[in-house]
Amino acid sequence: PEEISSKIAAGEVIERPSSVVRELIDNGIDADARRIRVRIEAGGRRYIRVTDDGTGMTRDDLLLCIERHATSKISTVSDLYSIHTMGFRGEALASIGAVSRMEIITRTEDQDTGHRLWMQGGKLKSIEPSGCVKGTTVIVRDLFYNVPVRRRFLKSKNTEETHVMETFLRICVPFTHIHFSLETERRLLLNVPSIQDPFQRFSTIFGKEIASLMLKNEIEDGDIKAIAYLGLPDITRSRADRILIYVNRRNVRERGILRTILDIYGKRIGSRRYPYVIVFLEMPPSSVDINIHPTKQEVRFKEPYRVYRLVENILNDALRREFRKVFQVEEEIPKAVSDTKTPYIQSRDLSFSKIPSPSSSYRIIGRLKGMYILWETPDGLVIMDQHAAHERILYERIKEGVKDRMTDKQNLLIPTILEFSSKEALLIKRYMERIRALSIDIEPFGPNTFQLLAVPAILSKVEPRSLIMDLLSILESGKQEEDIMEEIAQKMACHAAIKAGDSIGDMEILRLLEDLLNSRTPTHCPHGRPIIKKITFSDLDRMFNRV
């Protein structure tokens, strides 16, 4: 029966009061509104009202909008691949009306009188002329009153109110030309005026302090443009709810992009912490399918890995440039995505092709515990962990080497004889080919004894037995191949990097800095520990009560 199918369809589109708010605001945006006001009572369970000053509807359009799958936004199948509106399925108002008592009041600019429509439980009760201003007001009362099971699953007033607020904020972000407001029966919750500067809108969502610390970056790849606003790795939260992804200004859930963001930040902020990131993607409608789910919150890209690579580049570039500002290093911002790879470079005791000369903008002022290097910069003090810095440099070189089968190796003048337990010897024989693929030439030299003939040049000074034991542990872990290669690169870099207490001279420190500034991720070591910390002169003045 029609009544049952309408309720089933409504259940796919309308999950809770926030779903109603999202659909009605989307309609206001599509109607070219410049002012959208939302009011809820009892968390939206009892009452929702959304008013916009958009184009409004004629009587015929008003009757059409409550019919399932009746939409003026698409007329042919091909239109599904060129959608520019927020809504297009013709399901929202029909679905809302099927599970509530709904009232719509609307007028177009060229009409003297508007119209008022009442609908209850999916049935039209009346439609009549009504005096009203241009635009549309939709009032939804008693959501799920005729679907008691769904109504019982709604949460408390405060919980539903929080969901409405979150949905409202997410919609506000890209539409800076619209003035939004949200109120309850008690008070005005949010007032978001139209503005020119997106950072002002971010202040409403993230707070002024967080918004003021966010970085902006833009990048293009053909017909896809990405704009990212991101927080530094030092600014994190315990939930991922402030990672916002927009495709053609539509807030979406896209696992691949989210995974890319978390991978980039993961080694910088540690586990169970999440960054502040907003990513806007603009692309031709034909490059993305938004018709996967009735809520239109899931998308599928025509070229997903191209999109993921673009997101990876825009975030890495912004974080890298922010790090380099610490040392006042100028760099050219890339204008497009590049597929170039950093070649595997042989270790030369921290050497680099160009040795930077001491700069007037920063200078080495000392060392602490044989571990930390102190730099003076124009605006403060920078402390660098020498082991973490070298580990990051070697990790990136080794990772490229592992990917390219690490052909650059160094033969030992005198083979090293290594003895293992019976179990360890069995594992070495089992993984012999994989170990050799890492440019570690090892051969049996007795029942439990092996001779080491060559090692990767970058690991020539590493204690070989402990390295092989670590490799066996990783290979036996049962992890995915990609994770194994990642862990091997981390472990090798840790073994080869200069250690705490190792003494290095000023020229080696300058070489280390140059290599670090040229790395892809100069802010944190492969394990997620920070490489540098900065204390500004302003911080010092506050510490000593000078301000």
Image (cartoon, rainbow, N blue to C red):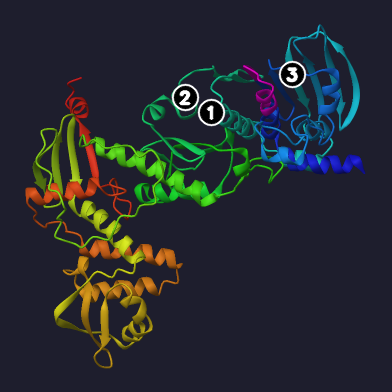
Residue depicted at x 23% and y 45%: 517
Pick out the residue farthest to the top.
112
Task: Please give the range of residues in magenta.
Answer: 25-37
Q: Tag 3's secondary structure? A: strand
Quadrant location of residue 77?
Answer: top right
Q: Earlier in the sequence, mark 3 or mark 1?
A: 3
Q: Is residue 118 above or below residue 510?
A: above
Q: Residues within 10 Å of mark 1 (few under 14, many from 20)?
A: many
Q: Nearer the viewer, residue 339 or 25?
A: 339
Packing grade of label 2 (10 A; few <14, some 14-19, many >=20) is: some
Q: Which residue is mark 3?
A: 137
- Foreground residue, 404 or 146? 404
Assign the N terminus to one quadrant of the image: top right
Q: Identity of the amino acid at label 3?
A: Thr
Of the two numbered discs 2 and 3 in the rendering, the one whose residue sits closer to the viewer: 2
Residue to which mark 1 is pinned: 173
Q: Which of the two labelled residues, at mark 1 and mark 2, occupies the earlier sequence position?
A: 1
**Of the pair 73 and 247, the residue shown nearer to us:** 73
Q: Secondary structure at mark 2?
A: helix
Quadrant housing the C terminus: top left
Q: CA distance from mark 3 to mark 1?
A: 22 Å
